[in-house]
Amino acid sequence: MNSSAPFWRWLWMVVIAVPIAVFIVWANITNPRQFVSTLLNGVTLAALYFLVASGFTLVFGLMRNVNLAHGSLYLFGAYMGWVVGDATENWFLAIAAGFASAALVGFLLQISVFRFMQGQELRQTMVTIGISIVLADLMLWWFGGEIYSFDPPRAIFKSMPMLVVNKYPTYRVVVLGVAIVIGLVLWWFLNRTRVGMMIRAGVDDRNMLAASGVNVQRVFAITFAIGAGLAGFAGVIGGTALSISPGEDTRYLMASLVVVIVGGMGSIPGAAVGALLIGLAEQFGLAYAPTYGVVFTFVIMVLVLAFRPTGILGRRTA
Amino acid sequence: MSAAQWRRAMNSGAGRNAWARPTGASAASPATVARAASAPPAGASVAFGEAIGAIKFRHVVVLLAVLIYPWVATPFFTYQIGGQALALGLIALSLTFLGGYGGMVSLAQMATAGVAGYMVAIFGIAGEAQGGASSLGWPWWIAVPIGIAFATLFATFVGWLSVRTEGIYTIMITLAIGVSFYYLVQQNYSIFGGHEGFNEVHAPIVLGVNFSHAIPYYYLALFWALAGYFFIKYLLRAPFGVALQGVRENARRMNALGFDVTAHRIAAYSIAGVLAGIGGVLMVWYNGRISPGTVGTGPMLDILIIAVLGGMRHPIGPFIGAILFVLVQNFAIDIIARERFNLVIGVVFLSIVLFSPDGLLGLWGYVRTRLQAGSVQLKLRGRNVG
Amino acid sequence: MRGTRIGWLGSAIGTALLAAAVSGPASAQDTIKIGALTNLEGPFAVPGLDGHRGVDLAVKLHNGMAGGKKIQILKYSSDATPDKAVAATRKAVEQDKVDIMIGPLSGDEGIAVKNYSKTHPEMVFVNGSSGAQATTLQDPSPNFYRFNTEGAQWMVGLGELALAKGYKKMWLVAEDYGFPYSQVQGFMASYCAKGGHVVKKAWVPLGTKDYSSIISGIPSDVDALLVVLGGADAVNFLNQAEQAGIDKPFIGGSITVDQTVLNYRGKKRESLLGTASAGPMADGIDTPAWKKFVADYKANFKDGFPSPSLFAYLYYINTQAVLLGLDAVNGDLSNKQEKLKAALAKLEFDGPAGHIKLDENRNAIGDTFITEVAKAPDGSFFNKVTHVVHDVSETLGLSKAEFQKMGLGNRDVPSCP
C-alpha cells in the first residue's frame, strides 16, 4: 500500500492540505476570535477523547479484545463518582471513586468472563455488546433518567483570561492538562515499570511473553483494570465538563471507536493523534458547518481507512 | 479430511478468528474448495441436484405450516409477527451469510436495507415530507429495482472499504459506516427528509391485490424469505460459496491456491447487499414509512442480535432468531414490565453468546444430546435397580 | 442429523405460534378498553413513565368509570421511533382490540400514528403528548383528536415579552428537528412581525453534547439568547455558557427550564433565576383547579416528580377528554363510534390549566402560560406565571391565509435576520 509512487502521495497531500490552508487563512481574516476558540475547543475535546480512548486502545493492544462495553464503564464510573462526590462533597474523591469502581468491574470481567474465551475475538466482542446492553439498562433502572451534575472546586470551574478570545472556561484547560499528565504517566508506566514492559512485550508477542515464564493472566487482568479504570476516570472528568445521563455510554463508545480506528488500534500515541483529529473535526464542523459536521468525523475515518487500513499509527497485526 | 484435521496437520492458526464455524458437510477446506472449483461447470448442477435431493419430509411439514399459517392466525399475527419476522429474518440472513460463512460480521446490514427502503420512498410514492424532500412518484416496478440496485452498490462500497481491514476491525468499521448513514439521513432534509423521514410509503396494489394488507404482505415476505433461504443454501454448495468458506478458514492459503480473496469477499458483500436490499424494501412496506430511527444504532444491533440468537451456522438461524425476537418485542410488555425489556433482551443475548455460541440451533443440539444421554442413563440405572 | 434438529425446531415453533395466534382475548360488553401508548424505552423513558401516571390519574379521578362503563387501561410502549409507535398501536388495535387509543408521546410518532389511524376509521384515536404541527395541519385524519396545543402554540406571547424587555436582536440555539422548528416558529412569528431580529440560528444536530464552539459563535452585539434545548442538553448548554462567561439573558423553550432541568441532581445554578419561558402549563399556576391537580398527583404517586411534568399533564387532559366524551354519549360505541366522534369534536371543558376546545382540524385551542424561574421558600426552583395568553389557535393568532403564506416552521422559516 505504501509503495505507491511519491507523486500520488504528493497529489493527495495537495488535495487535502490546500483547502485546509485556504480555510485557515479565510477564517482568521473574517473572525479570528471564533477560529481560535474553536481551535481551543477542539484541542480540549480531544483531551477528553484521549482519556476515554487510551483505555480502550490499551486493552485492545494487549488482548485483542474490542471492548464494546467501554462506554458503559465510562458511564458507570461517572455515576459511582457522582455518588461518592455527593456523599463526601469532595470532587477529588469522586475522581478516585470513578477510576476504582470501573477498574474493579473491568478486573472482574477479565477474570470471570474474558479469561475463558482468549483468542475468540469475535465472541468476546459479542459478549461485550451483551454486557453493554445489560449494564445500560441496569444503570437506567438504578439511577433513572435524571441529569447528574458534578460540583468541582470553584477555582477550576469559571472562566479565565486568554489571548485573542478574552475569556475561556478554566475547566477545559484543566482537562487538557489532565490528559497530558495521563499520557505522560502511561508512557512512564509502559516504558519504565516492570509490569508496563511486560504489557509492551505482550503487545508485540503474546506467545513469547507466556513462554518466558510471565504470568500472562495477571498481566491481562491488570491491563483490563487499568483500561476500564481510565474509562471511569474519564467518566468523572467528562461528566464534570458536561453532565451525566443515559445515552452517554454509546456516545463515548462511538467516540473511542472512531478515535482508535483513525489513530491505529492498540497504539497510545495513535489514540492521541486520532483524538486530536476527531476533536478538531467535530468542533470545526459544529462551528462552521453545523448541518453536516457530524458526518465529517466519519468521512475522515473512511478516508484514513482507505489509505491506511490499520490507522495512522497502527501496525499490521499478525 | 475435515477442516480441523487440516489445521492440525498444517499446524497453522487458521480459523482462530472464525467463531461461528459450521460443522459437517458444509465445512470447507482449501482442498475441497480446490476440488469443487476445479470441476466447473458440473459443480453448480451437482450442488443444485444435491439441494433438491436434500428435501425431506420435515421440510414439507415446515413449508406447509408457514403456508397455511395466515389462514389460522389473526391478521395481527400474520402481519406484525409473521410478516415482520420474515422481513427482519431476510436482513439478518444477509448477516449470517457474511458472518457465518464469510467470517465478516458486518453491522452495516441495516444501513444497506435502509438504503433500499429510502430509495423506494424517494423514487416511488410517499406522502408529503418536511423541508423540501419529495418523492419522484415513479411506479413501484421502477422504484424497487432502483432501491435494490442502490443497496447492492452501497454494500459493495462497504465491502470494498472494510475488506482492506481484517477480522475484528470489520465489526467496528461497519458500525461506524452504519452510524454515519444514520447521521446523513437525519441531517439531510432536501433528499432524505431529515428527522421525520418519509410517511405513507405503501406496498403497491398489483392486479387487484393490495400488498399492504396482512395476508398478501405475508405471502410476499414469505416468497422472498424462501427465495433468499434456498438461494443461500444453493450458493453455499456452489463453487463460490465453498471458496468463500475456504477464505474464511484460511485466506492466505486460498490466495496461494490462486483465488482472488479480496474479490470473493467483496462479492459476498454485494450478494448480502441484494438480500438486505430486498429485506429493506419489505421493511419499508411493512412499516409504511421510513425515518432515521429505522436505521439507528438500536435496529443495527437488533439485526446482529437476531442472527446470533438464531445461530450463524445454518441459513434457517436468522429466521428462528427473528421469530423469537419479534415475539419477545411484542409480548414482553404483557409478561414482564416493559421498562425492563432491554434487560431481558440483553440477558438472553448475553447468555446465548456466553453459553451457546451457536445460538438457539446450538442450544437445541446441546439439549438433544443431553436428553439422549439422560435417557440412556435412566435405562442403565433402571437395569441396576432391577 | 443436523437437519432433523432444525426441522423439529421449526415445527415446534410453528405449533406454538399457531396456538398463540388462534386464542385472542375476549372483551366484555360492560368494559371499555383504552390503550395508552407512551415511551418506556429510549430517550423519553422517564417522561414517558410520567405520561402513564397522567393517564392513570385521569381515570382514577373519574372513579374508573365513564358513560356508565368500567374503564380498563392497557399500557403500551415505544422508544420514540415512529416505527415502534405504529407497531405498538397496531398491537393494541388489532390484537388486544382496544376500543379507544391514546398516544403517542413525541412529534414524529404522532404523525405516524395519525396516518395509521386512517386505516381504522371505525375507532377514535386521541393524542398523548405529541406536538408536531404537521399532525393536524398537513393531511389531518378525521378520527385523530388532539386536546392539547402543540409546540408552536406553546411559545405564543414569548416574542412580545422579549420585545417588552428590550431584546431587539437575538441569537438562538435549538436542536435540528421538527419539535424545535415548531417552538422557534411560535416565538418568531410575532417577534419578527413586531420588529425583532433573530440575527443567527444555531441548529445543532441531535446528540450534540459539547456546545462550546456554538457558544463561541454567539455574536457580541445581541441582546439575549433563545435556548430551545431540553433535558441534559439544556443543562450542558447552560453549564458551558456560564463557564465561558456569557452574561446575556436567556429565554427558554417549553422544555428548556422544566423541572428536570431546574432540579437536576447536583448544585443549583443561581444564574437560571429570572429566565423567561412559555408552555401549555407551569408548576406555579395559581388556580384552585391546578393546585388540586398537583395535590392529587402527589397523593397518588409517591415515586413521581415533585410536581406533575408536562407529559403527565398532556396525557391527563387527553385522557380526561376521552372520559368526558364517553360520559356525554353514555358509553355508546356503536355504529363506528359516530356518537363519540361527534361528542369529542364539540367537547369543551376546563382542564387543570385552562379552558380547552377543538378547531376544525381537531387540534386544541387553549391557554399558553408565560413564566419566569423563581425560587421557592424551600430553595427549589419553579416556574412562576407572569402572564397568560388565552385561546391560542394553531395558526398562532394569524389568519389562515397569512399562516399558510408563512408555512410550517423549518430551518429557514420564519426568518428575520
Image (spheres, coloured by chain):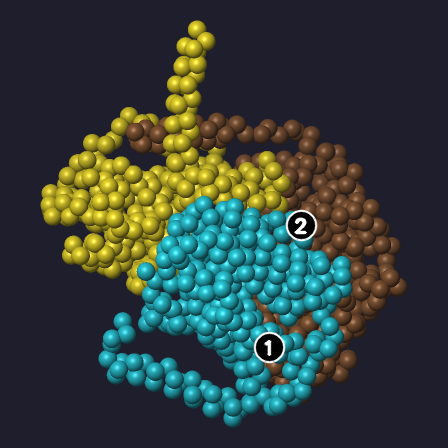
Chain colours: A cyan, B yellow, C brown
Which amino acid, by three-letter code, is at mark 2? Trp
Which amino acid, by three-letter code, is at mark 1? Gly
Where in the figure is residue B11, as x and y percent of width and height?
25, 48
What secondary structure is found at the residue carrying circle 1?
Answer: helix
Q: Quadrant of residue B318?
A: top left
Q: Is residue B304 visible?
A: no
Where in the figure is residue C162, as x and y percent of width and height?
74, 77
List the residue tagged with mark 1: A177
Q: Is residue B27 left or right of residue C239?
A: left
C231 shown above or below A180: above
Distance in Å between CA atoms under marks 2 and 1:
33 Å
Q: Is residue B215 left or right of residue C165?
A: left
Where in the figure is residue C333, as x and y percent of width and height?
65, 37
**Which of the image's four quarters has the N terminus of chain C?**
top left
- As drawn, the residue found furthest toward the right would be C377
Q: Quadrant of residue A201?
A: bottom left
List the residue tagged with mark 2: A142
Q: Residue at x 65, y 49 (%)?
A: A141
Q: Chain of mark 1?
A: A
Crowd around label 1: few <14 · some 14–19 · many ≥20 (10 Å): some
Tell if the residue under mark 2 belongs to the same chain as the one under mark 1: yes
Q: Residue at x 71, y 58 (%)?
A: A83
Q: Residue at x 73, y 77 (%)?
A: A155
- As drawn, the residue found furthest toward the top would be B386
Q: Which of A17 and A192 lies nearest the eye of the viewer?
A: A192
Where in the figure is residue C246, as x and y percent of width and height?
69, 81
